[in-house]
């Protein structure tokens, strides 16, 4: 089976508090207080140089070792929301971030008031071959804002790189009646067959979703 | 045999190497930032390199069941190029990253004043960030370079037990051990150290605070030298516990001082024809 990174659900503050130990919980309290402070003083406090970072951004970097790698995405998402991170801050955190930090930015975009302005970050992630980033890039934000050509290529890239298409938010809604996506999938399948290679099982599934009359899904995939 | 290679430059190696290392027992490694052979001309190319050590390279390693950490620094050679030294100003934002377990490689190349400054500055950065330091000892004028290195470490705020002096050999091991620092040995096909000489050193100095690495890079080198030392130790009468101490517990203890080691990768994720490391669609 292909490697199939998925995006586990992000935990709420309450859920995190129930799972974190005392020291990690205290660390999170302080980190969120710093993020809240940054949100309240967004207009007056600017970074003091090209490499300077406000305290909450240092917490953002250190989330894995203080809250555990398994909780890092959730903690980083909470920090971004609490800090009401703006596009410049998100771009800085993404561009200067580890793969894990970039991933958390991507997973949180739809929960911030950004409109389509953060699409360059999504497009950057879709250019990588890192399946953790690709899976995070095809979430709800891309479902809402990514234009048709790039969205189709994102779906195809998932099939190429073994990212399970369950990671693609709004897949059934956007695929329905998409004749161009159907053509791309058909060509990809033909290429695989010509090479004597398997056609990914997910391809058939997505191809079925492109049928114009496909039944409306009861739940977004 | 479980192996932690505490110094290897995987960006210069292939996926075949990752597979062979896994098969030989390598389950964790540290990749120090260093000189790429071709001199850099701006801080931006350092940043792309650091990003790769924090992004793509750990992803490649994980697909072969190997935990990847890194050490970041301005290397001794490029510390002499004023086009590169602004990297020192940007290091603090990198040293807070979760998978950075030391400042390194720092140290001397030609023992210039610029290298003095970079070494002292980066030892202080290590102290400020609660990190140990990986210190390269020079290829030329090695013993004098070691003495000067030890002097700078003594003047720094970093205690010797948080310093690893690397690329040691028969002429430098005694003074390095007397300094209280950890002692690293790079095993190479032709130069630096070989397996038999390493065994002789282990017989004299024991296994405490000694690390063995392949330091494999873009030059003639062998990423399986750690395993070959383990085999040579067993053949020479050392026990399994001695091998485990040198090849696993010692590097875990040294880099564990950072509080950032994550050795949780137990089994490789399945490799597949659609795997992204095959560039997609190949």
Image (cartoon, grey):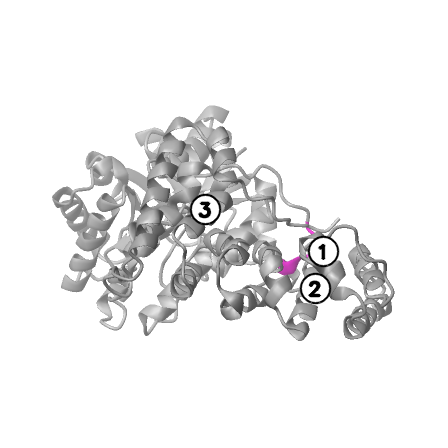
Mark 2 lies on residue: A155
Residue B203 in the magenta stretch? The answer is no
At 38% across and 69% down in the image, what residue appears? Answer: B45
Mark nearer the viewer, 3 or 2? 3
Q: Which residues are magenta?
A: B271-277
Q: Residues within 10 Å of mark 1 (few under 14, many from 20)?
A: many
Q: Which residue is mark 3?
A: A78
Residue B272 located within the stretch drawn in magenta? yes
Q: Position of residue B204 (x, y in %)?
A: 31, 30
Q: Earlier in the sequence, mark 1 or mark 2?
A: 2
Horizontal side of B28 relative to B127 (left or right) equals: right
Kindly identify the residue that appears in the image at 78 percent across and 75 percent down: A180
- Mark 1 and mark 2 in contact? Answer it, CB < 8 Å: yes
For mark 2, give the secondary structure: helix
- Going from N to C along the chain, the mark reached first, 1 or 3, is 3
For this view, does A25 lie left or right of residue B157?
right
**Left or right: B135 as drawn, with respect to B63:** left
Write down the chain letter for disc 2: A
The correct choice, above or below, for B234 with respect to B40 in the image is: above
B224 sits to left or right of B73: right
Whole-percent x, y for residue A26 in the image? 36, 33
Pointers 1 and 2 within a single chain: yes
Foreground residue, B43 or A54? A54
Chain to which the residue tagged by mark 3 belongs: A
User: Can residue B282 be seen in the rendering of this structure?
Assistant: no
B67, above or below A98, in the image? above
Residue A165 is marked as 1
Mark pair 1, 3: CA separation:
26 Å
Q: For the residue labelled by badge 1, is the local secondary structure a helix, a strand or a loop?
A: helix
């Amino acid at each position: 089976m292909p490697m199939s990174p998925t995006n586990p659900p992000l935990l709420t503050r309450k859920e995190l508090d129930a799972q974190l130990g005392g020291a990690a919980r205290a660390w999170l309290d302080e980190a969120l207080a710093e993020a809240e402070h940054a949100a309240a003083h967004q207009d007056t406090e600017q970074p003091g140089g090209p490499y300077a970072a406000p305290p909450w951004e240092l917490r953002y970097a250190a989330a894995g070792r203080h809250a555990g790698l398994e909780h890092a995405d959730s903690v980083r998402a909470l920090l971004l929301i609490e800090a009401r991170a703006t596009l410049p801050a998100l771009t800085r955190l993404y561009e200067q971030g580890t793969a894990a930090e970039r991933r958390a930015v991507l997973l949180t975009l739809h929960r911030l008031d950004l409109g389509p302005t953060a699409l360059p970050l999504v497009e950057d992630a879709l250019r990588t071959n890192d399946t953790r980033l690709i899976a995070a890039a095809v979430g709800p934000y891309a479902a809402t804002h990514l234009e048709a050509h790039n969205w189709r290529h994102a779906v195809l890239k998932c099939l190429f790189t073994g990212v399970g298409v369950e990671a693609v938010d709004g897949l059934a809604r956007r695929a329905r009646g998409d004749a161009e996506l159907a053509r791309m999938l058909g060509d990809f399948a033909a290429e695989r067959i010509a090479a004597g290679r398997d056609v990914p099982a997910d391809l058939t599934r997505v191809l079925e979703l492109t049928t114009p009359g496909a039944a409306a899904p009861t739940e977004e995939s | 045999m479980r192996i932690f290679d505490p110094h290897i430059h995987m960006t210069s190696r292939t996926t075949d190497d990752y597979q062979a290392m896994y098969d030989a027992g390598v389950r964790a490694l540290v990749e120090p930032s260093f000189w790429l052979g071709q001199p850099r001309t701006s801080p931006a190319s350092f940043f792309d390199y650091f990003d790769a050590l924090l992004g793509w390279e750990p992803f490649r390693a994980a697909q072969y069941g190997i935990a990847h950490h890194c050490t970041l620094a301005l290397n001794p050679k490029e510390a002499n190029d004023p086009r590169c030294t602004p990297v020192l100003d940007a290091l603090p934002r990198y040293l807070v990253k979760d998978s950075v377990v030391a400042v390194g490689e720092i140290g001397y190349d030609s023992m210039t004043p610029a290298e003095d400054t970079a070494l002292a500055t980066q030892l202080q950065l290590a102290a400020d960030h609660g990190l140990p330091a990986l210190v390269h000892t020079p290829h030329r004028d090695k013993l004098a370079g070691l003495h000067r290195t030890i002097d700078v470490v003594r003047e720094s705020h970093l205690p010797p037990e948080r310093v690893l002096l690397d690329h040691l050999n028969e002429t430098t091991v005694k003074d390095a051990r007397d300094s209280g620092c950890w002692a690293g040995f790079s095993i190479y096909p032709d130069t630096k150290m070989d397996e038999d000489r390493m065994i002789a050193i282990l017989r004299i100095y024991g296994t405490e605070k000694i690390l063995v690495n392949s330091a494999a890079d873009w030059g003639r080198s062998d990423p399986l030298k750690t395993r070959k030392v383990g085999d040579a130790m067993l053949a020479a009468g050392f026990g399994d516990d001695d091998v485990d101490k040198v090849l696993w517990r010692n590097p875990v203890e040294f880099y564990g001082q950072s509080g950032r080691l994550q050795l949780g990768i137990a089994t490789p994720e399945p490799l597949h024809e659609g795997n992204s490391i095959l560039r997609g669609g190949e």
